[in-house]
Amino acid sequence: MREIEFISTGRPTSDGAGVRLTRLFGGAQPERFDPFLMLDEFGSERPDEYMAGFPAHPHRGFETVTYMLEGRMRHEDHLGNVGLLESGGVQWMTAARGVIHSEMPEQQHGAMRGFQLWLNLPAKSKMSDPSYRDFAPGEVPRASLPNGIEAVVIAGHLVADDVSQAGAVQRPETEPQLFDLRLPAGSRIEPQLADDHRVLLYVFEGQISVAGQALAKNQLAGLTDRGPLRLEATSDARVLLLAGRPIGEPIVQYGPFVMNSREEIEQALRDFRDGTFTG
């Protein structure tokens, strides 16, 4: 069975124009989470903690995945894409050689809650064409399992308990699996995951057990890389499951640029300064 290798908790920080969030991982030791670069959780009912949003800023060399639990956020980018991310919706942006975009709240009150994940691209794809897609809540596949578990299948393919459900997005290069699992107390799930893939779990409601070890609310766990996985809910719980095939290439990051060498980072900075960033 896969077991818990480490447990960590996020650190409070802010990003954009002052949006309060919790950085669950990101920055130091990115190879530890390969192919995942960063995971942020944002959640507040105070407009002063999210209303400033994320004004126009650049990205190069990776993909961003935003999953909105509650709230409304509007995307605009230099390619002319405009999208509204609503509760239960997903936004998948492949920055590749370059995107300049903004993410701004479209609400004056109420909760703003969700996650943003940064997913690395292999060297051969870092300077490919950028792309953007948003998925309305009704376009994100969901699966109901016989034991009462409900799953939102954002990426990859969920196979568990005689249920098979493809996600909204497939990425053959990193084979990401991204599931939001809602587990009633006492339920159990054994999702099929490939050996040698990175597997991370984040509990954002309740508590679960992994191979007999407890994982509480607001804890992130990295798992061993082989064997079946069994999750058991010791209370009503909600878990974000991330799995993916490591790329195994050097990772050099400078802010919103993620490349394979310092020279490529310096080129990105020159391109942005010279106005040739997006090609």
Image: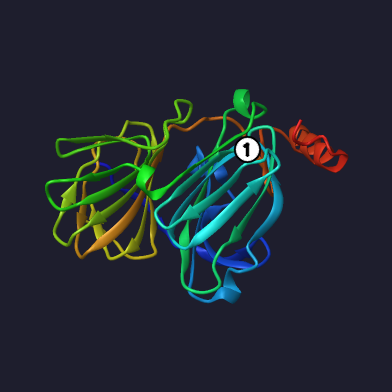
Residue 59 horizontal/vertical position (percent): 67, 43
Taking the spot 50% from the left edge, 60% from the top edge, the residue there is: 72
Quadrant housing the N terminus? top left
Percent position (x, y) of residue 154?
A: 38, 42
Q: What element does badge 1 sit on?
A: loop
Quadrant for residue 203, please give it.
bottom left
Q: In the figure, residue 191 lies in which quadrant?
A: top left
Residue 77 visible, this orientation: yes
Comparing 17 with 5, the one in front is 17
Q: Is residue 211 visible?
A: no
User: In this figure, what is the number of numbered marks?
Assistant: 1
Q: Quadrant of residue 54?
A: bottom right
Q: Residues within 10 Å of mark 1 (few under 14, many from 20)?
A: many
Residue at 29%, 51% in the rendered image: 181
Identify the residue at image location x=38%, y=42%: 139
- Which residue, as the protein is rendered here, is positioned at the far top? 124
Residue drawn where x is 63% and y is 63% of the image? 53
Q: Amino acid at mark 1?
A: Ala
Q: Is 242 in front, or is 73?
A: 73
Name the residue nearer the viewer: 151 or 219. Answer: 151
Eyeballing the image, is 266 above or below 149? above
Camera-nearest residue between 91 and 26: 91
Q: Which residue is mark 1?
A: 95
Q: Residue furthest right?
A: 274
Q: Position of residue 131 (x, y in %)?
A: 59, 34
- As drawn, is 83 to the left or to the right of 217? right
Image position of 40 (left or right of 141): right
